[in-house]
Image (spheres, grey):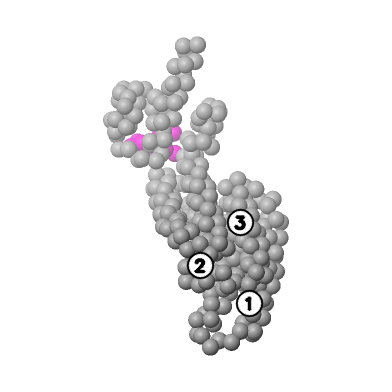
Amino acid sequence: MIMVYKMKKNNKTLKDILDIILYDNPATQDEIAQKLGVSRRYVTQLLKPLIDKKIVKRAYILDLKKYEEFAEPIGEDFSSKDHSATFLIKGMLQTMEEHVLKQLKTAFTALIENNIDKAELAMEMDYTTNNMFEKIRSSVDTVVSIDPSTQFSKTLIFNEIAYDLERIGDYSDHFSKFTINENTEEVNEAILDLLKSMYKSINKMIQNSMKAFLNGELSLKGDIMDLEEKIHSLQKKALNCIAIEMAETSFEDKTESTYYIYLSRLVKSFERIGDICVEILDAATEFHKNIPRPTVPRSFRK
């Protein structure tokens, strides 16, 4: 029992040591020991076999491929999946996805309720979205610098997904700005109902595309494409309703014409978010199946 406890304790400390090497890039064993509050001799004792096998390179850089091969057979508490750089960044992307979904929900709820306070809150949330993107980009740069032999193109896809999520946050701002600058109580009920349906489909589309990337659930492609078709159908109906209302309205006041322009922009925002979701799906296919993405822009595809 004592030996088992000691082994678990050693594994826990070694895990902490490797996490520091992987993410903090320490220069010396003294620095590692200081961060963990253990002796340098203990750090040396645990690292020596890994240095001898070149899993850890001097000065303390992990060979990620060898590290994963080493970690896999050790078991649940020390698996490569749970302690690899890609797992860390995927976790950051999942957190960013959850935040962006909340931002979009807050912005759209503000529109439905004509709530300026919620609209302003949603716009404040966009600052966090931008900071999350910068943090992920910085983490990807760190991973590449730690292990130059990493699959460079696949690692950079993480940056693309973070940027896609940031763009969804930007489109969410359109709903917030409309609520702040226009009287949303004047929006036709039929148009509001179509916007609600589009929001519901887009919300599901974002979740499915991120599941495809983060979890490799590429079987969701059919659902994602069906949702995109639904978005296009709802978009046509909404733009048609806006056009009819415009035709029945006199534009003596110039602000009324801009009102319909901005309302149409909300409809187009949902379409743009749908396009981004398909781009995430394409990136997921390349990431998990090594199938190159189409080079033709989506707007030109049949």
| Secondary structure under the numbered disc 1 in the rendered image | helix
Distance from the alpha carbon under mark 2 to that under mark 1: 17 Å
Residue 58, magenta (yes or no): yes
The residue positioned 39% from the left and 27% from the top of the image is 47
Instruction: Please state if 297 lies on the left or on the right of 142 as rendered.
Output: right
Quadrant of res 250: bottom right
The residue positioned 42% from the left and 46% from the top of the image is 143
The amino acid type, in three-letter code, at marker 2 is: Thr
Task: Tell which circle, 3 or 1, labels the residue nearer the N-terminal end.
Answer: 3
Residue 183, percent across and down? 52, 71
The residue positioned 59% from the left and 65% from the top of the image is 270
Check residue 203 in the rendering and tell me which mark sits there, or answer none: 3
| Image marks 3 and 2: residues in contact by CB distance under 8 Å | no
Comparing 245 with 91, the one in front is: 245
40 over 2 or under it: above or below: below
Tag nearer the camera, 2 or 1: 2
Residue 135, magenta (yes or no): no
Check residue 179 in the rendering and tell me which mark sits there, or answer none: 2
Comparing 104 with 43, the one in front is: 104
Mark 2 residue crowding within 10 angstroms, few (<14) / some (14–19) / many (20+) = many
The amino acid type, in three-letter code, at marker 1 is: Ile
| Secondary structure under the numbered disc 3 in the rendered image | helix
The span shown in magenta is 55-63
Check residue 242 in the rendering and tell me which mark sits there, or answer none: 1
